[in-house]
Amino acid sequence: MESYGGAGNREQAFVYALTGASLTHAVSKACSAGTSIRCGCGATPREQPGDDFRWGGCNDDVVFAAEFSRTFTDADFSQRKRLSKRTMTNKHNYAAGRKVNSVSYISL
């Protein structure tokens, strides 16, 4: 994403974070739906669910999805020997989006 105004701004930071979260979400849903051959169901819950809980199928594989998203979004950054402050900020914003997505799955 190239800037139209030169310096980064809050809106661009939000877009980078949203991109990281969206990609993680889409990949995790594809894994649990069985539409990807590279991944499958996520880990089962550690705690026993309550008596009124009914199992609904496959868990989302958030760990694989976050790693895939990191590899995809950070691919351009890994080729560079020296990262500018702007590039490091963009990389951070992608990671923030992935983290928000991953934490939201854990807390559900």
Image (cartoon, rainbow, N blue to C red):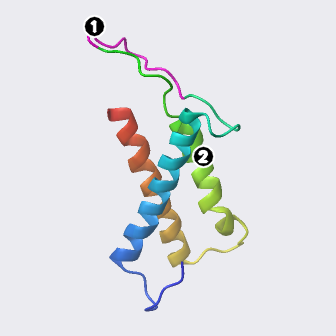
| Magenta region | 42-52
Q: Where residue 43 sits in the image (x, y, percent)?
A: 52, 25
Q: Where residue 101 sits in the image (x, y, percent)?
A: 41, 47
The Cα–Cα distance between marks 2 and 1, rounded to whole angstroms, is: 34 Å
Instruction: Residue type at mark 1: give it.
Output: Asp
Q: Where residue 16 sits in the image (x, y, percent)?
A: 46, 67
- The residue at 43%/42% (across/down) is 102
- Secondary structure of residue under mark 2: helix
Picture quadrant of residue 97: bottom left
**Circle 1 sits on which residue?**
51
| Within-10-Å neighbours for mark 1: few <14, some 14–19, many 20+ | few
Which of the two residues, 35 or 87, is positioned nearer the viewer here? 35
Q: Earlier in the sequence, mark 2 or mark 1?
A: 1
Instruction: Residue type at mark 2: give it.
Output: Glu
Q: Judge left or right: residue 72 versus residue 10.
A: right
- The residue at 43%/20% (across/down) is 45
- Secondary structure of residue under mark 1: loop
- The residue at 46%/91% (across/down) is 6
In terms of secondary structure, what is the magenta stretch mainly?
A: loop
**Circle 2 sits on which residue?**
67
Quadrant of the rendering where the N terminus is positioned: bottom right
Is 23 part of what is drawn in magenta?
A: no
